[in-house]
Image (cartoon, grey):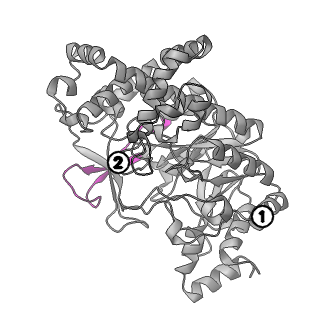
Amino acid sequence: MKPSENDLLNKRRAGILLHVTSLPGPNRTGDLGQDAYYFVDFLHKAGVTVWQTLPLGMTHADGSPYQCLSAHAGNPDLINIDWLITQGWLQLTDKCQDCQGSEKFNKSCLINKAYQGFLKRANQTDKDDFAKFCQDKAFWLDDFALFLALRVEFNNQSWSQWPGHLKERDSKAIKEARCRLVHAIDSIKFEQYVFFRQWMALKAYANAKGVLLFGDIPIFVSYDSADVWANRDVFKLNDNGDMLVVAGVPPDYFSETGQRWGNPHYNWTFLKKTGFNWWLERMHTQLEQFDILRIDHFRGLEAAWEIPAHEPTAKQGEWVKAPGKALLNAIKADLGAIPLVAEDLGIITNEVIELRDEFHLPGMKILHFAFGGGPDNPYLPNNYEKNCVVYTGTHDNDTSLGWVGQLSENEKKHVYEYLGNPVASLQCALIQAALASVANLAIIPMQDILELGSEHRMNTPGTTVGNWQWRFQWEQLTTERAARLAHLVELFNRN
């Protein structure tokens, strides 16, 4: 893919990083309701043309969008319930005791009731649309709906703990389960229909306002997922379906023991034999939802860190080669020149750089990483090329205000000097430096726009408590902050 083929990424743009769950609103988590549209309006007014989110998948109990139950399915927690009421499928009187209250709020219960209302009251156009959705998405939806219905039946146990005939997908057992759980399966399909319909409506609104949606693809999928249960040949598992090796990264900036993610590794031999069909189907789903895509942990397409499954940390492991060039060629042959960004942070070798550059993919530059080392630090703006994406920090970093607070006085002096001794606060100067750089795309986390401290960070790598919960409030977005952002976007020709 030549740069000229990727027009979306070959223009000076500004973007904001904000996951949907972090939107304001009256419910326990941000969703696809009115506040999402207000956020698009804010972006449009500021001249910001890119909204980057985290993955939209259905999470496990820890809430991490990088460990999902499906590589295709959307997260029902993002569904806006009020929309179901306006459609006439859910009545206010349908809310039972289990559906209400901040602690007891059960969105799936409400969506199931909306499905019953849909069957009774939906017009034929909507019913035909639902039928078409089920048909078009059958390649993943049929297995996912059955998987989720079984998972609920077995008290959310991993599929590896299910009775043997279902764990092994015995054809007779699968057929019987589809019949026995038909109502739950249909309701789950409806849930996905509502999610996709709401998301695609938001995408159409954003695009009409000149705002592009930028999505994130975790390179690996969760072991406890419909993908692994239904496609065991795609992954490195033993005959019993257990993982012999798990994914992660060795010790690095984020963790002295590395990061043991616990995801299964791909059986690249099988994937190559099948023309990477599983990956191509995954890309089709993501490109329907987003205008731009980031491949998280891009270096894993060149070589991935394989950790023996019995190891408690990521210290012990080895780099194992992956056929990234063949995969990217297959994606290009199937989908053409698509706007992909390579998350190339961490331990990056010349081979990874060559793979990224061969396909002209923009890599990532993080300003929080720029001021250690010498003048050849690749994260310093004077070392950028246009074909890259610059961030002050990502969802895995502290906020810029929190980052500044951890610097020594000498370190602050060095950063100030590099940035031209600005009058603005250091965290605001970082935003200006990102927007002023030659990078085609500059992304600022919403926390930095709002000048928030460490208690507002989204995720702390290597920890499992207190992550993915941050939300902003509209009163934090003062008129002055919004105006300053709009001014900088215009000043540096990013609108």
Q: Is residue 159 above or below residue 400?
A: above
Q: Residue at x 49, y 49 (%)?
A: 352
Badge 1 density bin: few <14, some 14–19, many ≥20, Cα 10 Å: few
For mark 1, what is the residue? 479
| Amino acid type assigned to the residue bearing label 2 in the image | Ala
Q: Is residue 413 left or right of residue 262?
A: right
Q: Residue at x 15, y 27 (%)?
A: 164
Give the image quarter of residue 399: bottom right
Q: Which residues are magenta?
A: 302-325
Q: Considering only vertical position in the picture, is 252 above or below 157?
A: below
Task: Name the residue located 71 percent from the left edge and 73 percent from the top edge.
Answer: 429
Q: Is residue 63 left or right of residue 179?
A: right
Can see residue 203?
Answer: yes
Residue type, numbered disc 1: Thr
460 to 64, vertically: above or below: below
Q: Nearer the viewer, residue 420 or 395?
A: 395
Quadrant where the image shows the N terminus? top right
Residue 371's disc number: none
Residue at the front extreme of this rendering: 93
Relative to residue 9, is residue 21 drawn left or right?
A: left
Residue 335 drawn above or below residue 63 = above
Picture coordinates of residue 171, whole percent (x, y): 23, 14
Residue 210 falls within the magenta-colored stretch:
no
Would residue 321 be counted in the magenta stretch?
yes
- Secondary structure under tag 1 reads helix
x%, y% of residue 34?
65, 43
Residue beneath disc 2: 61
